[in-house]
Image (spheres, rainbow, N blue to C red):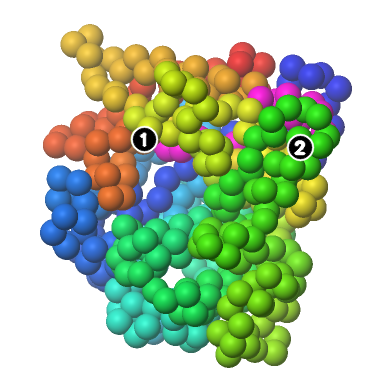
Amino acid sequence: MSATNDHTAFPEDFVWGAATAAYQIEGAAREEGRGLSVWDVFCSCPGAIDGGQSGERACDHYHRWQEDLGHMKDMGLQAYRFSISWPRVLPEGTGRINGKGLEFYDRLVDGLLEAGIRPFVTLFHWDLPHALYCRGGWLNRDIADWFADYAACVADRLGDRVSRWCTFNEAGNVGSLGHHLGIHAPGVSLAERDYFRLVHHINLAHGRAVGVLRERTRGEAHIGQAFNQNVDLPASDDPADVKAAEEKAFSFDPGNPWWSAHLWIDPLFRGAYSDEVRAHYGDAYEETVRDGDLEDISAPMDFFGWNYYMDWARPQQSDGQPVTMMKWAVHPKGLYWGPKILNARYGLPVEISENGLASMDWVTTEGEVPDHFRIDFMRRHLRELRRGIADGARVGAYYYWSLMDNFEWTLGYMPRFGLIHVDYETGKRTPKASSVFYRDVIRSHGACC
């Protein structure tokens, strides 16, 4: 990464982008050979989704991607992070390849490159093929090989043009929300020993996919994972407070292990589960982890993707504190402390793979969307990120979540995270004021913040 002596600027090679996920925007859930995902099935369960909604149509990006690409160009995006729909490429999860599904991503990648926008591909953003769930899903050890085969399929088709890869998005939420709390697809609550099996198989799938992407990307691959690890904000700049916050964030709580870095992150970087994990899971650990697994799991990565929205350890610090429509407190200083702490712990540059605000946005009678709170949110967070970089944090990119309003999982279509407003009845896109602000951020390389 290029260094800079100007404390008002971002590094010269810093990348500005926006992010989306396939199930949240694509739609066309039953078209051109796509198979069912666990989210298609979960959304059909009464009461699972607010308003009984689903991602079946979503933003109809599958048919309107060229229009959406035009908005990306207008915004001046340098990179676009999007996910591949596993069941669109492999309807049964393994075996038969759906050519039309791959053709869609071919067109999208070619369009991005023609527009001068780097494609950044996430392999898994929660939409597991339902057919694989029926074969045991993440509890079946074979899924590590199924995922590696899927990665090979995608890399063989796109790896001549795509070099930036993310294996999983928020694997910890796949486990905790989908398989512990049961509030996300597939909506189950596993026993602790089975939960560890799921964790290990996802970690193993990640590691094997890293190897496949290294081998099959034509050119130098840039590979990581997007984590949602909480980084507690220190009470002050005092080194003792910083150390206390780090120790709290990265401790193992046997009463609440579901999101722990000891499960989801440390093994990928250290080649071993902690003594606390081994003791807590006991014979389940011994039955699950096999010779060679930890070597596969710890395949070297190039960046640490970090999705940051708030400090989850302090959801509310005082009465009347600013909160988003998700009732998430606004903590901009996380983008100062987080990268520094993660750099030190894991030794890799950080990429802010998601950061954004959900708001009540609508198109005014003048045909505009004046989302000034989102602009203020971005400005505050980017100032802290810039300050952290000036103080030595290694950060390579920032991806705003999200490019456009979309299906927000169990909350349906009410929360709006996008830089672009979507009318879900007509499909009409309306760039918000924040998209103009972000365009200026990109043009000025962050100086206008």
Q: How many marks?
A: 2
Q: What residue range appears in magenta?
A: 384-403
State the residue at coordinates (68%, 70%): 276
In the visual, does 400 lie left or right of 47?
right
Q: Which callout, 2 or 1, points at the residue further toward the start of the chain? A: 2
122 versus 179 height, above or below: above
**Residue 221 or residue 103, whichever sits in front:** 221
Label 2: few (<14), some (14–19) or many (≥20) C-alpha neighbours in 10 Å: some
Residue type at numbered disc 1: Met
Which type of secondary structure does the marked residue at label 2 adopt? helix
Q: Quadrant of the C terminus?
A: top right
Label 1: few (<14), some (14–19) or many (≥20) C-alpha neighbours in 10 Å: some
State the residue at coordinates (59%, 50%): 229
Using the numbered discs, state the Cα–Cα distance from disc 2 to disc 1 in whole angstroms.
28 Å
In front: label 2 or label 1? 2
Q: Position of residue 410 (x, y in %)?
A: 28, 50
Picture quadrant where residue 338 is located: top right
In the visual, does 212 lie left or right of 361?
right
The magenta stretch spans residue 391: yes
310 versus 87 height, above or below: above
Furthest residue in direction front, as rendered: 255
Residue located beneath label 1 in the image = 326
Residue type at numbered disc 2: Val
Q: Position of residue 182 (x, y in %)?
A: 33, 63
Residue located beneath label 2 in the image = 242
State the residue at coordinates (34%, 77%): 133
298 versus 377 height, above or below: below
Observer able to see residue 211: no
